[in-house]
Image: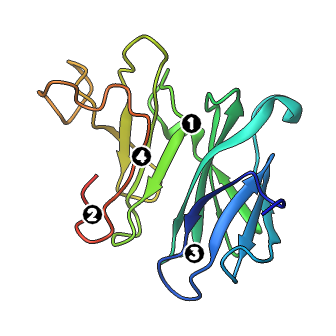
Amino acid sequence: MTEVDAVCTHNPYGKKEIYGFKGLNIFVSYDSGASWSKYASARCSGPTYENVITDMSYDGINGIMYYVTGPYHTGTYFGKLYNGGKSNTNLTGNLKKDSYFQLCAADPNHSDVVYVGGYMGNMSNPYGVQRSTDGGKTFRTLTTNGSDTVVTGGACGGINPYDIIVNPETSEL
């Protein structure tokens, strides 16, 4: 698979396509990676030569690709592609201020539920995991941070996640 650097997500419905990326380009394969076609170009903030896609997740119910881009694996742009990759919406401003994010995950059973989060190096990320229940318009913090959160206790509480995965059978994070 020389056309892509990584395969990040798939469509659990329909044609069972898989999605990968190279640089800021998103590719799709309908034959288990034997061949690839360009799906769309991801947007970023800042110079394109410094930015890469850090994560992608596909909402197969609505045909929406969520993605994170940024320099050196630190997300600075969170967006969603729809209409076959032709339309792009910037969702970065809807995240909590000063949040660190590199990851995203769409719930395969609930089309408007999407998660964003990530790690902050050696420090705790007060917005380690955020959840939207309206397709990315608004977000609530799911991290134990003592103030702006729906989770008020727990040992780690999602402070520095290195991956976000939604169970396709139970929708548990």
* Residue at disc 3, secondary structure: loop
Residue that carries the numbered disc 1 in the rendered image: 93
Left or right: where 113 falls relative to 19: left
User: Distance between the Cα atoms at labels 1 and 4?
Assistant: 9 Å
Q: Answer above or below: position of 36 versus 116.
A: below
- Residue 158 at what x, y percent from top left? 29, 32
- Residue 156 at what x, y percent from top left? 22, 25
Between tags 1 and 3, which lies in front? Answer: 3
**Mark before the other along the chain sequence, 2 or 4:** 4
Quadrant in the rendering for residue 74: top right
- Disc 4 marks a residue whose amino acid type is Thr
Residue ranking furthest to the left: 153
Dot 1: within a 10 Å radius of its alpha carbon, few (fewer than 14), some, or many (20 or more) residues? Answer: few
Dot 2: within a 10 Å radius of its alpha carbon, few (fewer than 14), some, or many (20 or more) residues? Answer: some
- Residue 50 at what x, y percent from top left? 82, 29
Residue drawn at the location 74% of the way across and 39% of the way down = 52
Between tags 2 and 4, which lies in front? Answer: 2
Residue ranking furthest to the top: 123
User: Distance between the Cα atoms at labels 1 and 2?
Assistant: 26 Å
Q: Answer above or below: position of 51 versus 116.
A: above
**Mark before the other along the chain sequence, 1 or 3:** 3
> Depth check: 11 or 63 in front?
11
Residue drawn at the location 22% of the way across and 30% of the way down = 157
Q: Which label belongs to residue 63?
A: 3
> Depth check: 89 or 61 in front?
61
User: Distance between the Cα atoms at labels 2 and 3?
Assistant: 18 Å
Residue that carries the numbered disc 4 in the rendered image: 138
